[in-house]
Amino acid sequence: MSKKKKYYTVWKGHKPGVYNTWNACKAQTKDYPSAVYKSFPSLEAATHALNSNPKDFIGNKSFTSGLTSEQLKKIGRPNYNSISVDAASSGNPGIMEYRGVDTKTKKQIFIQGPFQQGTNNIGEFLAIVHGLALLKKNNSNLLIYTDSRTAMSWVKKKNCNTKLERTDKNKDVFNLIDRAVSWLKNNDYQTTIVKWETKAWGEIPADFGRK
Protein backbone atom coordinates (compact mmCIF):
# COMPACT_ATOMS: atom_id res chain seq x y z
CA MET A 1 0.00 0.00 0.00
CA SER A 2 1.45 3.36 -1.01
CA LYS A 3 2.01 5.98 1.66
CA LYS A 4 -0.52 8.81 1.62
CA LYS A 5 0.73 12.19 0.51
CA LYS A 6 1.11 14.83 3.22
CA TYR A 7 1.43 18.59 3.10
CA TYR A 8 3.23 20.59 5.77
CA THR A 9 2.13 23.97 7.08
CA VAL A 10 4.88 26.07 8.64
CA TRP A 11 3.49 28.95 10.70
CA LYS A 12 6.79 29.84 12.35
CA GLY A 13 10.01 28.98 10.57
CA HIS A 14 12.70 30.46 8.36
CA LYS A 15 10.06 30.95 5.67
CA PRO A 16 6.41 30.27 6.63
CA GLY A 17 4.29 28.56 4.02
CA VAL A 18 3.00 25.21 2.79
CA TYR A 19 5.47 22.53 1.74
CA ASN A 20 4.79 19.25 -0.02
CA THR A 21 7.67 17.19 1.44
CA TRP A 22 9.00 16.58 4.93
CA ASN A 23 12.52 17.53 3.87
CA ALA A 24 11.29 20.91 2.62
CA CYS A 25 9.44 21.44 5.89
CA LYS A 26 12.49 20.40 7.89
CA ALA A 27 14.67 22.90 6.03
CA GLN A 28 12.36 25.70 7.17
CA THR A 29 12.10 24.58 10.80
CA LYS A 30 15.49 23.11 11.69
CA ASP A 31 17.47 25.37 14.03
CA TYR A 32 14.56 27.82 14.15
CA PRO A 33 13.67 28.60 17.79
CA SER A 34 10.13 27.47 18.72
CA ALA A 35 9.21 26.47 15.17
CA VAL A 36 5.49 25.75 14.68
CA TYR A 37 4.38 23.31 11.99
CA LYS A 38 2.02 20.42 11.31
CA SER A 39 1.16 17.94 8.55
CA PHE A 40 -2.18 17.82 6.71
CA PRO A 41 -3.71 15.26 4.33
CA SER A 42 -4.45 17.78 1.55
CA LEU A 43 -3.11 20.98 0.05
CA GLU A 44 -6.45 22.69 0.70
CA ALA A 45 -6.36 21.82 4.41
CA ALA A 46 -2.74 22.93 4.76
CA THR A 47 -3.43 26.24 2.99
CA HIS A 48 -6.49 26.88 5.14
CA ALA A 49 -4.46 26.21 8.26
CA LEU A 50 -1.71 28.59 7.17
CA ASN A 51 -4.22 31.42 7.09
CA SER A 52 -5.62 30.48 10.49
CA ASN A 53 -4.42 30.51 14.07
CA PRO A 54 -2.08 27.54 14.66
CA LYS A 55 -3.64 27.10 18.10
CA ASP A 56 -6.76 25.90 16.31
CA PHE A 57 -4.76 22.94 15.01
CA ILE A 58 -2.01 22.31 17.55
CA GLY A 59 -2.41 21.61 21.23
CA ASN A 60 -5.92 23.02 21.45
CA LYS A 61 -8.09 20.23 20.12
CA SER A 62 -11.48 19.68 21.70
CA PHE A 63 -11.60 16.28 23.32
CA THR A 64 -14.47 14.15 24.54
CA SER A 65 -13.65 10.97 26.40
CA GLY A 66 -15.50 7.80 25.50
CA LEU A 67 -15.16 6.52 29.07
CA THR A 68 -18.03 6.37 31.53
CA SER A 69 -18.33 8.87 34.38
CA GLU A 70 -17.38 6.11 36.83
CA GLN A 71 -14.26 5.27 34.83
CA LEU A 72 -13.28 8.93 34.65
CA LYS A 73 -13.85 9.33 38.38
CA LYS A 74 -11.65 6.32 39.09
CA ILE A 75 -8.82 7.65 36.90
CA GLY A 76 -9.10 11.18 38.26
CA ARG A 77 -7.38 14.25 36.85
CA PRO A 78 -3.72 14.72 35.85
CA ASN A 79 -1.25 15.78 38.51
CA TYR A 80 -0.05 19.16 37.28
CA ASN A 81 2.98 19.02 39.56
CA SER A 82 4.70 17.30 36.67
CA ILE A 83 6.33 17.43 33.27
CA SER A 84 5.11 15.53 30.22
CA VAL A 85 7.37 13.99 27.57
CA ASP A 86 6.70 12.72 24.09
CA ALA A 87 8.40 11.87 20.80
CA ALA A 88 7.54 12.15 17.13
CA SER A 89 8.87 10.03 14.28
CA SER A 90 8.19 10.59 10.60
CA GLY A 91 8.41 6.94 9.58
CA ASN A 92 9.50 3.95 11.63
CA PRO A 93 12.39 4.32 11.48
CA GLY A 94 12.43 7.91 10.30
CA ILE A 95 13.26 11.46 11.30
CA MET A 96 12.76 11.61 15.06
CA GLU A 97 12.66 14.20 17.81
CA TYR A 98 11.53 14.36 21.42
CA ARG A 99 10.67 16.97 24.01
CA GLY A 100 9.43 17.70 27.53
CA VAL A 101 6.91 20.35 28.58
CA ASP A 102 5.25 21.66 31.72
CA THR A 103 2.07 19.58 31.97
CA LYS A 104 -0.20 22.48 32.95
CA THR A 105 1.12 25.34 30.80
CA LYS A 106 2.60 23.24 27.96
CA LYS A 107 5.67 25.48 28.10
CA GLN A 108 8.55 23.64 26.45
CA ILE A 109 11.31 22.68 28.88
CA PHE A 110 13.62 20.76 26.54
CA ILE A 111 13.69 19.49 22.97
CA GLN A 112 16.17 17.35 21.04
CA GLY A 113 16.30 16.70 17.30
CA PRO A 114 15.24 16.25 14.68
CA PHE A 115 17.59 13.30 14.17
CA GLN A 116 18.03 11.71 10.76
CA GLN A 117 16.97 8.22 11.85
CA GLY A 118 15.22 6.93 14.94
CA THR A 119 11.96 5.39 16.11
CA ASN A 120 9.12 6.66 18.24
CA ASN A 121 9.96 4.21 21.04
CA ILE A 122 13.58 5.33 21.11
CA GLY A 123 12.45 8.95 21.29
CA GLU A 124 10.03 8.18 24.13
CA PHE A 125 12.80 6.36 26.04
CA LEU A 126 15.30 9.20 25.57
CA ALA A 127 12.69 11.77 26.58
CA ILE A 128 12.00 10.02 29.88
CA VAL A 129 15.68 9.67 30.74
CA HIS A 130 16.34 13.28 29.73
CA GLY A 131 13.54 14.30 32.09
CA LEU A 132 14.86 12.12 34.91
CA ALA A 133 18.36 13.58 34.62
CA LEU A 134 17.05 17.15 34.48
CA LEU A 135 14.76 16.74 37.49
CA LYS A 136 17.50 15.10 39.53
CA LYS A 137 19.95 17.87 38.62
CA ASN A 138 17.41 20.48 39.76
CA ASN A 139 16.48 18.50 42.88
CA SER A 140 12.87 18.67 41.70
CA ASN A 141 9.93 16.69 43.07
CA LEU A 142 7.95 16.82 39.82
CA LEU A 143 6.75 13.54 38.36
CA ILE A 144 6.99 12.55 34.69
CA TYR A 145 4.07 11.65 32.43
CA THR A 146 4.59 9.52 29.31
CA ASP A 147 2.09 7.83 27.04
CA SER A 148 4.48 4.97 26.19
CA ARG A 149 4.34 1.78 28.24
CA THR A 150 7.19 0.43 26.10
CA ALA A 151 9.48 3.29 27.07
CA MET A 152 8.50 2.94 30.73
CA SER A 153 9.47 -0.74 30.56
CA TRP A 154 12.82 0.05 28.93
CA VAL A 155 13.61 2.64 31.60
CA LYS A 156 12.69 0.21 34.37
CA LYS A 157 14.95 -2.45 32.85
CA LYS A 158 17.70 0.15 32.21
CA ASN A 159 17.95 -1.02 28.62
CA CYS A 160 16.81 0.40 25.28
CA ASN A 161 15.49 -2.78 23.69
CA THR A 162 15.24 -1.42 20.16
CA LYS A 163 15.55 -3.60 17.07
CA LEU A 164 17.02 -0.71 15.08
CA GLU A 165 20.53 -1.55 13.91
CA ARG A 166 23.41 0.87 14.42
CA THR A 167 24.55 2.59 11.26
CA ASP A 168 26.38 5.78 10.38
CA LYS A 169 22.97 7.30 9.70
CA ASN A 170 21.80 6.91 13.31
CA LYS A 171 25.13 7.24 15.09
CA ASP A 172 24.01 10.38 16.95
CA VAL A 173 20.87 8.65 18.24
CA PHE A 174 22.78 5.62 19.48
CA ASN A 175 25.29 7.90 21.21
CA LEU A 176 22.35 9.34 23.14
CA ILE A 177 21.02 5.84 23.87
CA ASP A 178 24.40 4.78 25.26
CA ARG A 179 24.53 7.87 27.46
CA ALA A 180 20.96 7.31 28.65
CA VAL A 181 21.56 3.65 29.55
CA SER A 182 24.79 4.59 31.34
CA TRP A 183 22.95 7.29 33.31
CA LEU A 184 20.25 4.83 34.39
CA LYS A 185 22.82 2.28 35.54
CA ASN A 186 24.86 4.83 37.47
CA ASN A 187 22.17 6.99 39.06
CA ASP A 188 19.41 6.55 41.58
CA TYR A 189 16.33 8.73 41.29
CA GLN A 190 13.13 9.35 43.24
CA THR A 191 11.05 10.64 40.34
CA THR A 192 7.78 8.81 39.72
CA ILE A 193 7.05 7.93 36.08
CA VAL A 194 3.32 7.78 35.35
CA LYS A 195 1.36 6.59 32.31
CA TRP A 196 -0.64 9.42 30.74
CA GLU A 197 -4.31 8.39 30.47
CA THR A 198 -4.95 9.36 26.85
CA LYS A 199 -8.46 7.86 26.75
CA ALA A 200 -9.49 10.02 29.70
CA TRP A 201 -7.48 13.20 29.17
CA GLY A 202 -6.74 13.44 25.45
CA GLU A 203 -3.30 13.72 23.89
CA ILE A 204 -0.37 14.20 26.25
CA PRO A 205 0.60 17.91 26.55
CA ALA A 206 4.02 17.21 25.00
CA ASP A 207 2.39 15.79 21.85
CA PHE A 208 3.84 17.33 18.69
CA GLY A 209 0.36 17.63 17.17
CA ARG A 210 1.25 16.18 13.79
CA LYS A 211 -1.10 13.20 13.67
Image (cartoon, rainbow, N blue to C red):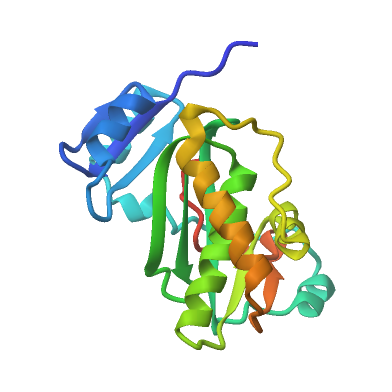
Which residue occupies 35% across, 31% down?
Answer: 8
Q: Nearer the viewer, residue 81 or 142?
A: 142
- Image position of 1 with respect to 190: above or below: above
- Residue 122 appears in view: yes
Which residue occupies 59% across, 43% down?
Answer: 120
Residue 158 relative to residue 98: left or right: right
Which residue occupies 40% across, 57% down?
Answer: 111
Q: Nearer the viewer, residue 160 or 193?
A: 160
Which residue occupies 24% across, 44% down?
Answer: 11
Q: Nearer the viewer, residue 147 or 61?
A: 147
- Image position of 179 with respect to 89: above or below: below
Q: Point out residue 6 in the picture as x, y percentages from the top left corner.
A: 44, 24
- Residue 95 appears in view: no
Q: Quadrant of the N terminus?
A: top right
Residue 158 relative to residue 39: left or right: right
> To which quarter of the image does residue 159 belong?
bottom right
Q: Point out residue 97 in the picture as x, y percentages from the top left corner.
A: 46, 46
Q: Point out residue 78 in the picture as x, y percentages from the top left corner.
A: 63, 77
